[in-house]
Amino acid sequence: MTIETKTAPTMDGLDALYRTQRDRLRRIAYLMTGQAAVAEEIVHDAFIRVHSHLDTVHSPPAYLRTTVVRLCIAWQQRDRMARERTPYDRQWVDPPEIDEMWDRLAQLPPDQRVVLVLRYYEDLPLGQIADVMGCRPVTVRTRIHRALNRLRKEMTP
């Protein structure tokens, strides 16, 4: 008589997933939060969440990306509340790859910032962005259009 037990996901599978997805996810999280330490923490939280059901997730990279985006949005909401209560003091130097566009992106509402990061930094099609954000593709198109119009107005002298 054999007893079947459900085995935990292999560490090899998680390790391979971590090696292939970590840098891309950190980039997304950094572009959305503007802070390397926060981005690193969010990515680690996403991997912790996927670990417990790695064997049941259909597409672990998509699951991770969605989790990272949602964790970033939650962080942005908490951060915005904190910033409203305390004055903003920029005490760090941005990495060279982040230019004045980051400052402009940071001024956008979170939903518009997310669609621009996923569309233009991650090159995701509208359907995948809609899946990540839990909305329809037409909503994604509208948010992209509004975000680009807002950026154009701010950049025009």
Image: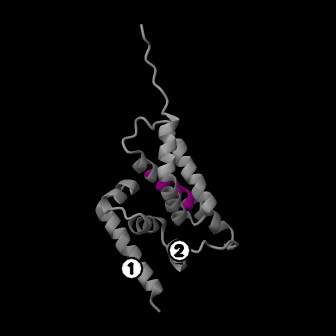
Q: Amino acid at mark 2?
A: Trp
Residue 80 drawn at (x, y percent): 58, 65
Q: Which residue shows up at 55% across the image and 61% down it?
A: 76
33 to the left or right of 111? right
Q: Amino acid at mark 1?
A: Asn
Residue 125, relative to residue 89: is it above or below? Answer: above
Q: Which residue is mark 2?
A: 102
Q: Residues within 10 Å of mark 2 (few under 14, many from 20)?
A: some
Separation of residues labelled 1 and 2 (CA atoms):
16 Å
Main SS type for the magenta part?
helix
Q: Position of residue 63 (x, y in %)?
A: 42, 47
Q: Left or right: where does residue 39 sit relative to residue 149?
A: right
Task: Tell which residue pokes out farthest to the left in this image.
Answer: 138
- Categorize mark 1 by other alpha carbons within 10 Å: few (<14), some (14-19), many (20+): few
Which segment did they paint magenta? 66-76
Where does label 1 land, which residue? Answer: 149
Q: Is residue 57 left or right of residue 22?
A: left
Figure check: 156 above or below 100: below
Residue 75: say if magenta.
yes
Residue at image coords 40%, 40%: 57
Helix, strand or loop under label 1: helix
Choose between 35 and 154: the one closer to the eye: 35
Residue 20 drawn at (x, y percent): 47, 51
